[in-house]
Structures are given as C-alpha cells and as structure tokens.
Image: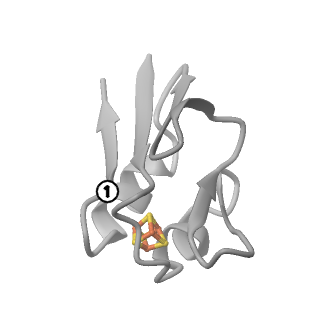
Amino acid sequence: MAKVIHMRDICIGCGACAAVCPKYWEMKGDGKSHLKGAKMINPDHFELVLPNAECNGDAASSCPVTCIKVVK
Ligand code: SF4
C-alpha cells in the first residue's frame, strides 16, 4: 500500500507533477495541482491510498517545494 499526500497550500503550481504523472495529477483553475480521486482531509491536505505508488514517486521527486509525499 502507498499513501500519497498533497499539502496543497504549499503547491506553487509549477505543473511538474501533472507532467510526469498525469494519471494522478492535473492542474486546476486556481493554478494549483489536484491529486485525482484524493480524499480532502482539510482544504490544504489531500490523501489518496493506492495498492502501489506508481508514478507518484516521480511526482514527489519532481516537486520543487516537496509538497507531495509518498508513504509506504
Ligand atoms: S510539482 Fe509540486 S508545486 Fe508543482 S504543481 Fe505539483 S504539487 Fe504543485
């Protein structure tokens, strides 16, 4: 299992996550990214549990402000 965490308040909207992992990441109208299918823990914190991390590891590595975490 892998839990993908997005601390959305920190996101600067660079688009890197959506570029390397479009299956799970998309850019939204407010300029920040969105983790598709994620549960909102609060407006700044989203989580998605998956069988494995897939490309979310690349998304986390590509994020310049480290607001994506993958916990295994
Ligand atoms: S890579 Fe990080 S800062 Fe850039 S859009 Fe994705 S979550 Fe936001």
Q: Residue at x 30, y 23 (%)?
A: 72
Q: Is mark 1 within 8 Å of ligand 1?
A: yes
Where residue 5 appears, as percent x and y from the top left, is: 41, 38
Instruction: Say above or below: 46 vs 55.
Output: above
Instruction: Say above or below: 46 vs 21.
Output: above
Tell me if 37 is positioned left or right of 10 in this view. right
Q: Residue at x 46, y 83 (%)?
A: 14
Where residue 67 appears, as percent x and y from the top left, is: 31, 56
Where on the picture, by quarter, is residue 66?
Answer: bottom left
Numbered marks: total: 1
Where residue 38 appears, as percent x and y from the top left, is: 63, 35
Instruction: Say above or below: 66 vs 27.
Output: above
Instruction: Say above or below: 54 vs 68.
Output: above
* Residue situated in front as seen by the camera: 22 or 26: 26
Point out the residue furthest to the front here: 43
Tell me if 6 is positioned left or right of 15 in this view. left
* Residue situated in front as seen by the camera: 34 or 18: 34
Where residue 2 appears, as percent x and y from the top left, is: 42, 24
Tell me if 17 is positioned left or right of 11 in this view. right
Quadrant of the frame with the N terminus: top left
Amino acid type assigned to the residue bearing label 1 in the image? Cys
Ligand 1 lies in quarter: bottom left
Q: Residue at x 66, y 74 (%)?
A: 30
Where on the picture, by quarter, is residue 37?
Answer: top right
**Circle 1 residues within 10 Å: few <14, some 14–19, many ≥20:** some
- Name the residue carrying label 1: 67
Q: Residue at x 29, y 62 (%)?
A: 61
Question: Colour scheme in the image?
Answer: one colour
Dot 1: element: loop
